[in-house]
Amino acid sequence: MTRVIDSKSSDAAAVACEVLAAGGLVVIPTDTVYGIAARIDRPDAIRRLFDVKTRMEVKPVAVLAANLEQAMACATFNDTAVDMAREWPGPLTLVLTRDPDLAGIELGGDPASIGIRVPDHELVREILLVSGPVAASSANRAGSVTPTTCGEIAALFGDAVNLYIDGGKIDGSPSRVVSLIDEMKILRDQ
């Protein structure tokens, strides 16, 4: 049975944290598009995220953090990265050298790097403060457009996702992605 909860519900964050802690997948509203999230310390959940999206593991998923402090526990921040992180919370994903403590976590792509962002969505940051960082990707099948409503996403994924948080229509675009590995390079502009 597909479980949907309104983002304005007083227990939305607590329910999402319980599902994530149990190794479940949660569709979350963000400031850009809907995403599918799994805790980064739940490898089976991250594998399911790739499977549900039909995403090839050569293409990485990002990590969402509640704040700069959480992000800095996941990656190496040089002065440029710290300066760019002043745009957070917001639609900017920084690709940085992954913290060695996260070396064994399969996020797809280059295992030495990590794409990280702090979303400008209060509920999501509240969840992240409790759950810790999550692996996340847009709530779509690989190569398809991300639906703009939770209902469309629930119809697409059904029971393959454990919880859907309905944040209304989100008609945004994915975040800007900037790599700071070796030299600054824009990987995706808005």
Image (cartoon, rainbow, N blue to C red):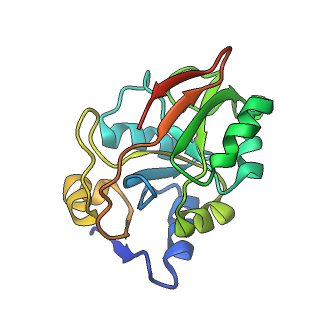
Q: Residue at the location (60% across, 34% down)?
A: 94
2 up-or-down from 111: above or below: below
Question: Which x, y percent locates residue 87?
Answer: 63, 47
Question: Which x, y percent locates residue 126?
Answer: 61, 68
Left of 148 or right of it: where is 55?
Answer: right
Is residue 19 visible in the rendered image? The answer is yes
Question: Which x, y percent locates residue 42?
Answer: 58, 47
Q: Residue at the location (27% across, 69% down)?
A: 1
Q: Residue 159's image quarter?
A: bottom left
Left of 70 or right of it: where is 148?
Answer: left
Left of 94 or right of it: where is 3?
Answer: left
Q: Residue at the location (65% across, 57% down)?
A: 66
Question: Which x, y percent locates residue 172?
Answer: 34, 52
Q: Residue at the location (23% across, 65% down)?
A: 151
Q: Tag count in the figure?
A: 0
Is residue 99 visible in the rendered image? The answer is no
16 up-or-down from 157: above or below: below
44 up-or-down from 177: above or below: below
Residue situated in front as seen by the camera: 126 or 14: 126
